[in-house]
Image (spheres, rainbow, N blue to C red):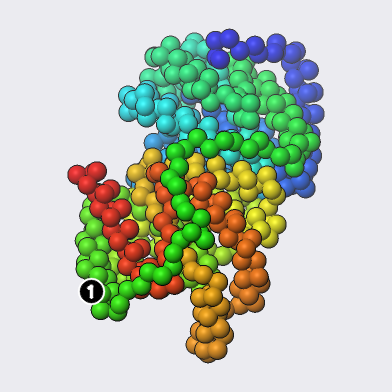
Amino acid sequence: MLKNVAIASKPAKEEISERLDEEQAKLAANQMRIRSAQVPVVVIFEGWGAAGKGSVLGKVIKDMDPRFFSVATLDAKPTEEERMRPFLWRYMVEMPAQGQFKFFDTCWMEEVTDGLARDELDGAAYDRRIDSINMCERQLVDNGYLVMKFFFHLSKEEQRRRLDALSAHKNTRWRVNEDDYRENEQYDRFLHIYDRYLRDTNRSSAPWYIIDAEDGRKWATLQVLEFLNNGIEVAIHNRGASAPLRQNVFPLKHVKPLSAIPLDKTMEFEEYRNQLKELRGRLRMLHYEAYRKRIPVVIAYEGWDAAGKGGNIKRITSALDPRGYRVYPIASPEPHEKARHYLWRFWERLPKDGHIAIFDRTWYGRVMVERIEGFCSNNDWRRAYNEINEFEHELVEAGTVVIKFWVQIDSETQLERFTDRQNTPEKQWKITDEDWRNREKWDQYEQAVNEMLARTSTTFAPWHVLESNDKRYARVKAMRIVVNAIEKACRRKS
């Protein structure tokens, strides 16, 4: 791309100044249009050292309202804390809300190309990073984001001149380091690395724009502004258009429909107590081993109201070191969460290496309650099956153990438990009018759950159905599944 891109001819100095004023005024107006249309905008600046990204960024935002944009500057080398989570985590948590701009002064490109340049990424690892980035950018666009990516390009000679000029002045010397000079000395090698990355991540949903940074800051700024304003106008025009549905590409593991799962399994109290004691002991030691081996674990619970999720979770956590796990009860999204990609609030809550995150309800709300209650469009929830599979695949590829439980009861058992809650003062907080309303939609929810199980039970993150008419049986089964999954992960890391 860098060798063959056709860059527009640089206009005369007077014309640049006139057009620059026009485009800056247009961006200020477009910012308000973006806010009104509630489109979240991600702008990524990448490029050669000393290409002027920071200076151009300052010019681009000059007339924008600072209440509705922010700037993220991310180092190519993740911190120790960031390395304890999946590759995309530190970028996803920075994603803007609807109607907001987020400018990235370098984003995921630098981490990947720096890894290649230092021979820290082999071919397979590089390919995984590229797949993750393309998936993430596509998901953002499909969910209403505008993603604009700019690469600032300049020649070896011009880069060297700028590096020397910056190094010569005491007030700008800090802006140059040995990596910048290494990049210049190995210009042809880095040109190949950057060109490869740009080609591999140049997609119609989020194309690259190559900025001629050779001939001054004003000209570079004008190029960015014209591309950005055009992108904004197209995004507003296309606001609300449905994104294409994508075919699942992940291998699936068959799960029986709920109506075909027998719920007559029971466990006597003595057997329950003995098995629970033995499994608790194993899980306690496994938690320490997983911490030592830096294996993160995500346990996701979905199920019918009153199916026993809370009691099930309580038995799991009773075996864990409280410093090494967190339980997240997931309710309706808060306004700041609703204004972002629906997976954002779950990216935020992912565990560090060696820690356990337990979700009491999950990202699957997209294909259940949001689907049935009309909180998202048909296109949104139909598209979500593949997006969720991609999300979970990203976690597993990062070494996370993903365990998913559907807690199953029949309608009669639910009614008994609802009635017990209603008639027992200390349990009344557990029952709401919404629970009764959801019960009236049992058949709709069962259909949605069956489709969810069929389309998202992947071989790397399968669903486990817990027969919970007998809570004791379900608790022991869940504990055993968790123990086996963590044991298996620990053996792989031996």
Three-letter residue code for mark 1: Asn
> From the image, which quarter does the N terminus lie in?
top right
Q: Quadrant of the C terminus?
A: top left
Q: Residue at x 50, y 64 (%)?
A: 303
Vertical order, 109 against 87 (above or below)? above
What percent of the width, then of the height, locates residue 425? 53, 90
Q: Is residue 296 left or right of residue 169?
A: left
In percent of width and height, residue 52 lies at: 56, 25
Which element is circle 1 on? helix
- Residue 335's image quarter? bottom right
Query: What is the count of numbered marks?
Result: 1
Taking the spot 67% from the left edge, 33% from the top edge, the residue there is 60
- Closer to the camera in the image, 425 or 406: 406
The answer to whether residue 146 of the structure is visible from this angle is: no
Q: Is residue 202 visible?
A: yes
**Whole-percent x and y of residue 3?**
54, 10
The residue carrying mark 1 is: 274
Q: Give the image location of residue 179, x and y in percent.
A: 38, 25
The residue that appears at 68% across and 22% down in the rendered structure is: 223
178 vs 17, left or right, is left
Q: Quadrant of residue 267?
A: bottom left
Measuring 53% from the left and 32% from the top, which residue is drawn there? 134
Q: Is residue 109 above or below residue 401?
A: above
Camera-side residue: 136 or 313? 313
